[in-house]
């Protein structure tokens, strides 16, 4: 069990979170704002807060962790966007600083983890499109060095392994511009896909812009689903269909595990609730051939 709500931690120090992003991408990306809101809801009653540093390189991330550990700035750290053989995991294991991973247990290397099953979510997305008659599917991915991107790509390939389904994947970087460029490339294909899964809501908005600039209609000519629902999806024109996770609940689960660690108990690995497909106005039946 964690600390009681009325308990506080003596001389509390913040919880460190580093994020490798261009500032303009982070500013437009709702996921981490929602995640931090969920963490805060759990840890603030104990006198804790989240200290975020958005950094331009992975090397800077590692250096920041070292500075925090040397100066005693933070009480624990949260690791996100892991890659294979992530040096940050090795660092926290050497330093002994309490840490949890937001990501799959297979990449956490024994650290406590809170994760979403991306394979299940991708199958939901593909099944959604196939049930609507789509047979030419595309996946616009996030950065391909990230382990969760690789997991989604593998799941997309497996879920689409049907006799009459054709697929293509194009990489992006979570920015709106990369979503627009990826969609422009997809529209140039012959035949073009009729349905596209985007790995983030921001990239999906860029994709929607590209479709509209090409004079095509969504969903009559092409369907789009965004990974992670957000206010931006709900307010887009037309409103964006999305794979909806309860991101704040993921943050709350991470906060609960952090309190366990700070209370001197071993953290655990927990799977967050599965995503559900929210059908709005950007997904519909496949266009007639």
Image (tube, helix red, strand yellow):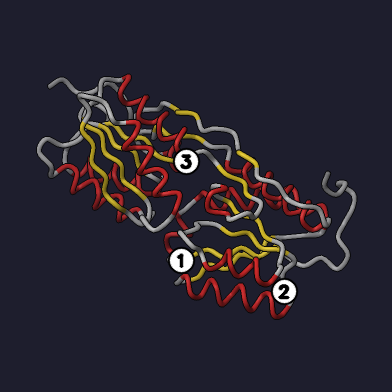
Q: Nearer the viewer, mark 1 or mark 2?
A: 2
Residue located farthest toward the left when viewing the structure as drawn: 190
Q: Nearer the viewer, residue 187 or 281?
A: 187
Residue at 39% from the left image edge and 54% from the top image edge = 174
Report crowding for label 1: few under 14, some 14 to 19, many 20 or more residues within 10 A (C-alpha): few
Q: Is residue 10 found left or right of 186 in the rendered image?
A: right
Q: Quadrant of the C terminus?
A: top left
Q: Which residue is mark 1?
A: 23
Q: Nearer the viewer, residue 228 or 170?
A: 170
Q: Quadrant of residue 136?
A: top left
Residue at 51% from the left image edge and 33% from the top image edge = 275
- Residue 127: image location, x then y, percent: 36, 25
Considering the numbered disc 1 on the image, is that residue within a helix, a strand or a loop?
A: helix
Q: Is residue 75 found left or right of 4 in the rendered image?
A: left
Q: Which residue is mark 3?
A: 228
Q: Nearer the viewer, mark 2 or mark 3?
A: 2
Q: Is residue 74 found left or right of 288 in the rendered image?
A: right
Q: Which residue is mark 2?
A: 73
| Relative vertical location of residue 3 with respect to residue 12 in this rendering, above or below | above
Per the model, the C-alpha gap separating discs 1 and 3 is 20 Å
Q: Nearer the viewer, mark 1 or mark 3?
A: 3
| Relative vertical location of residue 147 with respect to residue 98 in this rendering, above or below | above
């Amino acid at each position: 069990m964690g600390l009681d709500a009325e308990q506080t931690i003596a001389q509390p120090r913040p919880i460190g979170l580093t994020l490798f992003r261009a500032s303009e991408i982070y500013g437009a990306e709702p996921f981490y704002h929602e995640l931090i809101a969920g963490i805060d809801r759990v840890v603030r009653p104990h006198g804790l807060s989240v200290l975020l540093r958005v950094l331009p390189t992975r090397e800077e991330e590692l250096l920041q962790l070292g500075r925090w550990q040397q100066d005693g700035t933070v009480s624990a750290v949260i690791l996100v966007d892991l890659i294979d053989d992530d040096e940050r995991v090795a660092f926290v294991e050497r330093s002994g600083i309490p840490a949890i991973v937001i990501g799959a247990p297979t990449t956490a290397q024994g650290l406590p983890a809170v994760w979403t099953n991306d394979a299940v979510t991708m199958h939901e997305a593909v099944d959604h499109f196939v049930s609507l008659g789509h047979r030419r599917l595309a996946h616009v991915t996030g950065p391909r060095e990230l382990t969760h991107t690789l997991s989604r790509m593998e799941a997309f390939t497996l879920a689409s392994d049907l006799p009459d389904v054709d697929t293509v994947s194009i990489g992006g970087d979570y920015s709106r511009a990369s979503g627009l460029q990826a969609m422009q490339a997809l529209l140039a294909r012959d035949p073009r896909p009729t349905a596209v899964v985007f790995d983030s809501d921001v990239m999906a908005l860029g994709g929607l812009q590209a479709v509209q600039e090409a004079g095509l209609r969504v969903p009559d000519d092409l369907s789009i689903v965004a990974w992670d629902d957000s206010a931006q999806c709900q307010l887009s024109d037309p409103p964006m269909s999305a794979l909806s996770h309860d991101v704040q609940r993921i943050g709350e689960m991470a906060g609960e595990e952090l309190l366990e660690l700070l209370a001197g108990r071993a953290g655990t690995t927990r799977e967050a609730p599965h995503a559900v497909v929210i059908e709005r106005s950007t997904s519909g039946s496949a266009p007639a051939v």
